């Protein structure tokens, strides 16, 4: 149920779900300018906290910052000491390397779902996404909540005032890493339609139980191309070898 779980509860539920899957050894580990990547059964990505919040220390030697298996890496999500660090990014990339992408074909990418559900509605977006201006044209009111607001954005500290007004809410998957997701969900109305977006987003059913309606993440059908792009310093928008996928909560309408 939305707003009833702490950040620790949410992260531990994801870790527990991952640990129900057969474990896998961690292979390649890579950090670039914007993203972390881990290969095990699949290739998993996550945004680097140090890129999102400049001034925070970057991860050291990536392979030395993770244990040998995904289950052990997932357990780190339950450690409050890794919150808002690149260690959390690496742990989530490891989680994403083991969670399988949804079997059902997505009806449309996450941004298209937002455009469809947000038409004529009050929409709040936590994080500045490339499609924000297109969304602004479609909805009745749009608030873009940012810790480092640009012109036209709203300071993220006002989320508690803004989110109760929103019919549709989009949150970045990095809210799992920086400790803010539980508070944001607690500010959303029970009837709000909530989408989690971005490469950090894990395809974990536990997030549906927390009140998220759509998990709009990605899979990596061409790991070599994706890893080459990350080595070159590319962020997700310019990355090859990835595919955006939207997994809709069973029973939710898009």
Image (tube, rainbow, N blue to C red):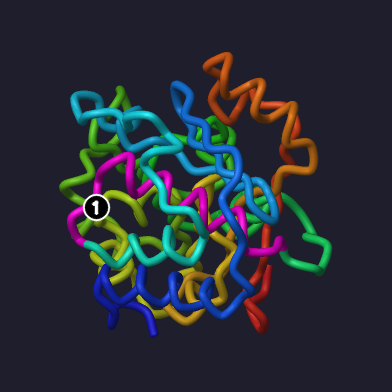
State the image coordinates of residue 207 (x, y, percent, origin top left): 48, 72
Boundaries of the magenta span: 80-101
Give the quadrant of the C terminus.
bottom right
| Count of picture labels | 1
Along the viewing direction, whichever of 188 and 238 lies nearer the viewer: 238
Q: Name the residue tied to disc 1.
A: 83
Q: Residue at x 64, y 28 (%)?
A: 227
Q: Is residue 241 left or right of residue 138?
A: right
> Seen in the image, is 181 located left or right of residue 22?
left
- Expressed as whole percent of the image width and height from the top left, the position of residue 81 reads 18, 55
| Residue 13 image-quadrant placement | bottom left
Q: Residue at x 59, y 38 (%)?
A: 28
Any part of residue 165 in sight: no
Residue 148, compared with residue 47, is above or below; it is above
Q: Would residue 70 be visible to someone looking at this image?
A: yes
Badge 1: how crowded within 10 Å, few (<14), some, or many (20+)? many
Determine the residue positioned at 52% across, 32% down.
30
In this view, the residue in front, 143 or 84, is 84
């Amino acid at each position: 149920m939305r707003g009833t779980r702490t950040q620790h509860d949410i992260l531990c539920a994801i870790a527990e779900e991952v640990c129900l899957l057969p474990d896998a050894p961690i292979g390649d580990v890579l950090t670039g300018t914007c993203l972390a990547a881990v290969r095990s059964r699949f290739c998993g990505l996550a945004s680097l906290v140090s890129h999102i919040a400049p001034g925070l220390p970057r991860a050291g030697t990536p392979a030395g910052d993770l244990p040998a298996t995904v289950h052990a890496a997932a357990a780190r999500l339950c450690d409050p000491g890794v919150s808002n660090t690149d260690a959390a990014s690496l742990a989530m990339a490891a989680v994403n390397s083991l969670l399988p992408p949804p079997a059902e074909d997505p009806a449309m990418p996450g941004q298209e779902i937002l455009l469809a559900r947000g038409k004529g509605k009050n929409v709040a977006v936590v994080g500045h996404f490339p499609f924000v201006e297109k969304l602004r044209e479609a909805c009745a009111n749009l608030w873009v909540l940012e810790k480092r607001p640009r012109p036209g954005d709203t300071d993220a500290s006002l989320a508690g005032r803004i989110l109760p007004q929103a019919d549709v809410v989009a949150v970045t998957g990095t809210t799992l890493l920086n400790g803010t997701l539980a508070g944001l969900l607690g500010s959303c109305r029970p009837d709000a339609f909530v989408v989690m977006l971005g490469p950090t987003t894990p395809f974990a059913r536990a997030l549906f139980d927390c009140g998220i309606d759509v998990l709009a993440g990605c899979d990596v059908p061409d790991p070599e191309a994706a890893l080459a792009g990350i080595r070159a310093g590319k962020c997700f928008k310019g990355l090859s070898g990835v595919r955006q996928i939207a997994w809709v909560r069973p029973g939710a309408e898009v």
